Amino acid sequence: MDPEKILKFLTENIAEFFKVSVDTLIRPVAKFQLVPLALMADSSLVPNAGFDSSTRPWLHPLLFAFATVSAILGYLINSLIPNRRPGPDLLVTVVVTLIYWFVYSIGLHLLSRALRGRGQYVDTLSVNLQVLATLSVVASFLTLGLSLLTRLSTMDRLIIQIPEVGGNLRAEPAFFFFGIQALLLAVYLPLALKHVHGFGWIRQLLIGILPFITMWFGVLSFVTVGLMDFYVA
């Protein structure tokens, strides 16, 4: 294959990846249109293909590609964190991360329905996977930046003074990830689900609490198992 065509393909897709990420941060709504499940294997499939009684909507294949690339990017960024504990290899990390995002999205949909949300399961899954993937990369990047700052003597002295957690943050800067991820999700998940389920402010606030609860599951996994790449939202 022509190297110029390969470079062009990679450039176009990387640009599209960052465009979706930036668009998600600006306005967290689904960027990948649903496709008819019956036509998924059709090479002529287009995002706006019509639905009829013989089909049902499902996730666009490009969403899976976006989530996979995000998981890989998160892994690569996390691997640069100073004093990072050894974790699973890339393949294991990506598979477990994708499974977790699916499970987390299913849980969010069940919670949304319990709060009398009006959206469909596939709509919840589509926007949640996109938001989780985007924020995972952002949180990983911010964690790397903060972990590098902790190596400065001034920042190190400030961190060690934080009650209860300062020592842990100093020894393992990657703990920043859990707090950053929870804060980001507490903002973006309610906004995303608002568009899908028509939530008002009260139900958005209830959704915003969830990331701070699930954050402790990630901390517990990290402390007890040491699986650095099994970050959760």
Image: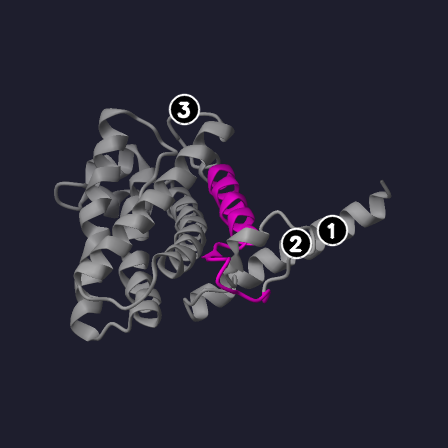
Residue 54 is covered by the magenta coloring: yes
- Which residue is under mark 2? 13
Residue 176 is left or right of residue 224, and the answer is right
- Which residue is under mark 1? 9
From the viewer's side, name the closer residue of 126 and 166: 126
From the viewer's side, name the closer residue of 25 and 85: 25
Number of on-image labels: 3
Residue plotted at (32% across, 43% down)? 103
Residues rendered magenta in the picture: 48-77
The amino acid pointed to by label 2 is Asn
**Where, by quadrant of the figure, is residue 216 drawn?**
top left
Residue plotted at (30% across, 34% down)? 172
Task: Determine crowd level at label 3: few under 14, some 14-19, many 20+ residues with C-alpha closer than 10 A.
Answer: few
Picture coordinates of residue 104, whole percent (x, y): 30, 47
Q: Can residue 161 be seen in this view?
A: yes
> Regarding mark 1 in the picture, which secondary structure is present there?
helix
Q: Is mark 2 in CB contact (under 8 Å) with mark 1?
A: yes
- State which mark lies toward you, 3 or 2: 2
